[in-house]
Amino acid sequence: MGESSDFGGLPYERLLRVLSTEVGAVPAMVWRADLVKNEISFLTDHTIPGLEDSIPRLLQDQAGGDAILAKQDRAAFARFHDRLRQRQPVSEVFRAHGGDGLMRWLYILGMPDPEMTFCYLGLLADCTGLANGILQRGNETGLALHIELFDNPVFIVDLGTRRVSAANAAARAAFGLDPDNGAIDLARLFAANSDVYLRDIYERLLFTRAWNGLLTIHDTEGRACVCMSRVRAYDRDGGSQLWFSLNPRPAPKSAAAATPQPLPGVARRLAAATDVRGLLRVLLGEARVDAVMLSRIFIGEGRVAVTGVGTPFESVNDNDSHPYTGSIAENIVLFDLDHVLVADTGKSIKPIDWALFIPKGIRSYLALPHFVDGILHDVAIFCATRPRAFSDTDIAPYAALAASLWAELPRLTDTAATEA
């Protein structure tokens, strides 16, 4: 199934025409988000009375949007941001308090851009007058019948019987998940994942009914397969079920010949450092940027731990913890990136930018990942207090600085890892 199938495979121009016809006189805003650059652009000039200045912030920053959202609808809006980051179709209804004191019903519709890779198209409409109709959008009847619409592995587990009650062809072929083969013990199915990791997943499903992240499942040939996974919990006919949607990650890129090599002069200065901040200060001097940050990635724990140097990060504690969801690391894993370049954080839709970089005055940055055995381990982030401080031509020299850091980092992080 193609990414645009929810909209009949319409190209972007026809999509806008169809939307304008279907929506009619309902005020609507159309926007595009670039998920690699983490920027949002508005493609129409519609405004929503009472929310003229709030809508851009609402779309860019989930935490900032909570200030105007109805408390009961924050989970729906969180699902929208989650689906956007995962480049999955979304349809949600939520309420927002306008500056004029009125509560408005908003409808947001989104889909992967069928013409621009890693971009996402969305429509946000003021449907206050149509709220009753929107609330009757339908239910989840027939989910089991619809999983064959997906070309990635999708299956459903009945928690009462611990059976796979439905599995599409892709799930059967890749993982042998055949409902006719009897009960499937979830502990056996996910045996390659730690108990602590699985307990955290089940806890999140219990309280938020949704979880996204990496799961390791053995394929039909017995090989461990790391999958980007989406899990949803729902109740139907008096029972509880889990919906699993898996996207197996490709094997790590083999590009040893193109791997940046450490710089001898920088390596000598790094070797003299006695802590992580000392390593980062060497890079700060060499790169001549405003700040440098190291992000250590703990995907299994759902967090990243950051340490920064430079004036903007003076108040940031060593190993300051932030959620993995919405982080730079998540983008790198989701899209298999070898770098992330954000030209202007003021246009960002990434939670970590609004939680960390923007409050510290960082307006642009270049992030470079470090993989160990195919798993993202660290990210080095070179930061500037002015927009557009980095370009594609800067990647190679900064990558060489990062390579120098990766060669020296294990010497000082073995002890720190137990303290983070």
Image: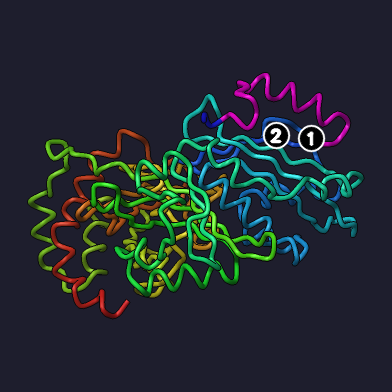
Instruction: In this rendered view, identify the residue nearer to me: 44 or 218.
Output: 218
Give the position of the C terminus as an image quadrant. bottom left
The image position of residue 352, as x and y in percent, is: 49, 58
- Residue displayed at 19% across by 57% down: 405
- Mark 2 neighbour density, 10 Å: few (under 14) some (14–19) many (20 or more): many
Residue with the mark numbered 1 = 46
Instruction: In this rendered view, identify the residue nearer to me: 12 or 43.
Output: 12
Dot 2 lies on which element?
strand
Q: If you read the primary sequence from the N terminus, does the residue marked by circle 1 or circle 2 appear first?
A: 2
- Kindly tell me whether residue 420 is visible in this rendering: yes
Q: Is residue 383 above or below residue 344?
A: below
Which mark is nearer the camera, 1 or 2? Answer: 2
The image position of residue 341, as x and y in percent, is: 40, 42
Report the colour scheme: rainbow
- Residue displayed at 50% across by 44% down: 38
Which amino acid, by three-letter code, is at mark 2? Val
- Which stretch appears magenta? 4-27
Main SS category, magenta section: helix
- Residue displayed at 74% across by 36% down: 29
The image position of residue 141, as x and y in percent, is: 69, 48
Decide if residue 130 is on the left or right side of residue 171. right
Residue with the mark numbered 2 = 30
The image position of residue 322, as x and y in percent, is: 45, 67
- Mark 1 neighbour density, 10 Å: few (under 14) some (14–19) many (20 or more): some
Is the C-beta separation of discs 1 and 2 under 8 Å? yes
Residue 90 counted in the magenta span: no
Query: Residue 169 occupies which quadrant of the picture?
Result: top left
- Kindly tell me whether residue 308 is visible in this rendering: no
Q: CA distance from mark 1 to mark 2?
A: 8 Å
